[in-house]
Image (cartoon, grey):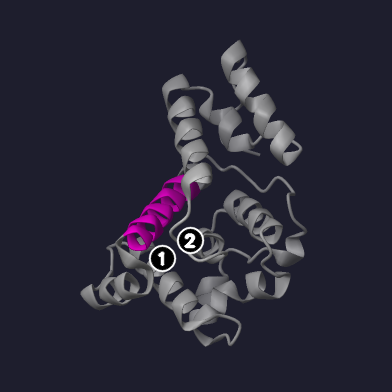
Amino acid sequence: MARIDPPARIGLPVRAALAVTRRMFGRRLDPQVLTAHHRGAFWADLLRDGVLLRTRTALPPGLADLVNHRTAVVIGCPWCLDFSAMLALRTGLTPERLLAVPDYARSPLFSALEQRAMAYADALTATPLTVTDEQVAELRTDLGDAGLVELTHLVALENQRSRFNHGLGITAQGFTDAAVCAVPGAVARAES
């Protein structure tokens, strides 16, 4: 149960947008419904996400999904873990790889590039930030400037989403079987 209730009234344009996401995912997305309390925030998020879905091209296939999921794991947002796992499975990532994300640094399931990208996500998500010049230089060599910018943007955006959802207490909606979602707290267990 979220920490706030959905808006009592939702205007027609927002209801129409929510209907589109219902068709895409089989249900309305709880974060969108709660964001409807503030129309400016709702439309800003919707337009941003729509543009990103249509323009993401600089990263190798699957890397964005891994990095988004890793960021959600680090923050521990149940809704984000559920949703990012569903999206990753839709694009071809296996349940085995998703479950290995909390321990990616020691897992043979990830390439060196994937491990560097997830380490970068960790560094961007840490407070204070721990990004190093060496990390950026390696990823710039791997991905080019456009890829590095896209990767950085995706991690920052997932931080915003995860912190928003976690802050409002938005829980998982059951997009995936809990067996394929990395459990909040797994990062601490994996690193100890």
Q: Is residue 121 above or below residue 108?
A: above
Q: Are marks 2 and 1 in contact (CB under 8 Å)?
A: yes
Nearest the viewer among 16 and 29 is 16
Question: Where on the picture, by quarter, is residue 28?
Answer: top right
Q: Nearer the viewer, residue 66 or 128?
A: 66
Q: Which residue is mark 2?
A: 71
Residue 18 x %, y %:
64, 26
Task: Report the amino acid beneath label 1.
Answer: Ala
Residue at x 58%, y 19% (from the top left corner): 14
Tag 2: amino acid: Thr
Q: Classify 10 Å Cα crowding around label 2: few (below 14), some (14-19), many (20 and above).
A: many
Q: Is residue 161 left or right of residue 182?
A: left
Residue lying at 65% horizontally and 74% vertically, measured from the top left: 97
Q: What kind of element bears circle 2?
A: helix
**N-term mark: 2 or 1:** 2
Q: CA distance from mark 2 to mark 1?
A: 6 Å
Disc 1 marks which residue?
A: 121
Say which of 19 and 175 sits in front: 19
